[in-house]
Image (tube, grey):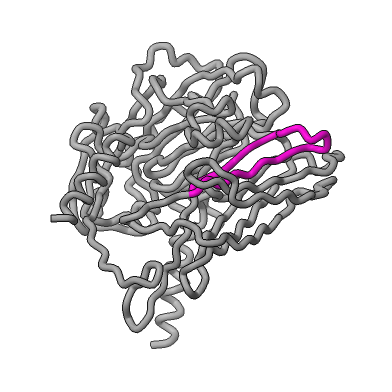
Amino acid sequence: MRSICILSAALIFIAVWGGQNQPVNDWENPRMFNQNKEAPYATFVPFPDIDSALKNDRKSSPYYQSLNGMWKFNWVSKPPDRPLDFYKPEYDVSGWKEIVVPSNLEFQGYGIPIYVNSDYEFAKNPDPPHIPHDNNPVGSYRRTFTLPEGWKGMEVFLHFGAVKSAFYVWVNGHKVGYSQDSKTPAEWDITPYLQKGQNTLAVEVYRWSDGSYLECQDFWRISGIERDVYLYAAPKVCIRDFFALADLDENYANGKLSVSVELKNHMPKLRAGKFNLELQLLDEDKRLVVSETKAVDIDKKEAATLLFEHKVKSPRKWSAETPDLYSLLLQLKDKNNRVTEVAGCKVGFRKVEIKNGRLLLNGVAILIKGVNRHEHDPYTAHVISEESMVKDITLMKHECTL
């Protein structure tokens, strides 16, 4: 029996990983879900100054450029029929139809939306990690863009909020990368592929991949570019990531603020000089609560991490009934004391604990009420507007008070 099990495992291994060096499609390879993507980080975009950062509207930043809108589009029902060279700038897409981005293909007339519970919609006899080669629609997207003049000398990133189920990206004919994971962002540094004037962006989306085996739930099974697509620019030495914890002490009286900030140097072979990172915490009336500046020498280094820790006396506590928030600001300055970037977020002081089998918020036992929100709109499918989110939250809060 032990020999049989070993033999079976070996056969499965050969079948899955493509024995004898047989090529394996990326979308059928469990080991392949990321090509050249940026590591995940806190959601933010750079701002040029504190005033704009306090507005907390990324779309108003001069370092943000939306790529939403009408794209040239081609759809086929299976991979062998897709246009292979469409990503090349010289490929003529003038005869293609157009599609709005973001949107779900099946709600734009391409393919059929499928609703099932625990079954796999793409195969009656599923054979993981394989996907049927005669039934796996592919959408090919093309558009052009031009960078703002103010982005000269900056690092430029391409961001996809969500794409289902797997996709490739090219810029000016150069392959940038590949991604799976249909409900998490995918981002690439496209600086090396950019050119002056008009740039060509191409995206190839597969409806199903081996990742689809992990997405089996009571849900509408549809595909496409489902969330915002945008560019943003950052200085060569930038705030790469940050994590803020606004906790309370054991008596729930005073706050404990801990902020970790990671800086990234995109020119480590050159002398970047010394930088200063200033942290500020403002209350709802924009009064300064915490302020600290730390120097960092990032010369010929790829990254640096700074830690800020402060006690805050008697802060306003966050809860569902009193959702008091503070504004956290991170201001990066170069050796000439010039502000190169400002980032930030809202934070709330609260302590979450489990004691004696009870969930406590700020020392008070709470009962959580909620619903299963499937992120589905009756008109726009999985493309959800901010207005729709607010409407759902308002409705849920209203029902919970009844």
Q: Is residue 205 left or right of residue 308?
A: left
Q: As displayed, is residue 106 above or below residue 211?
A: above
Residue 284 pos. (x, y %): 47, 44
Q: As displayed, is residue 70 above or below residue 64?
A: above
At 65% from the left edge and 61% from the top edge, which residue is drawn?
309
Q: Residue furthest bottom?
A: 1
Image quadrant in which the C terminus is located = bottom left
Q: Is residue 337 left or right of residue 314?
A: right
Image quadrant in which the N terminus is located = bottom left
User: Where are the magenta residues, as a range?
Assistant: 326-346
At 26% from the left edge and 64% from the top edge, which residue is drawn?
368
At 39% from the left edge and 22% from the top edge, which residue is drawn?
69
Inspect the magenta stretch and tell me whether residue 75 lies in it: no
Q: Main secondary structure of the magenta part?
A: strand
Q: Is residue 66 left or right of residue 47?
A: left
Residue 213 can be seen, yes or no: no
Q: As displayed, is residue 17 above or below residue 67?
A: below
Inspect the magenta stretch and tell me whether residue 335 lies in it: yes
Asked whether 324 or 279 is in front, the reply is 324
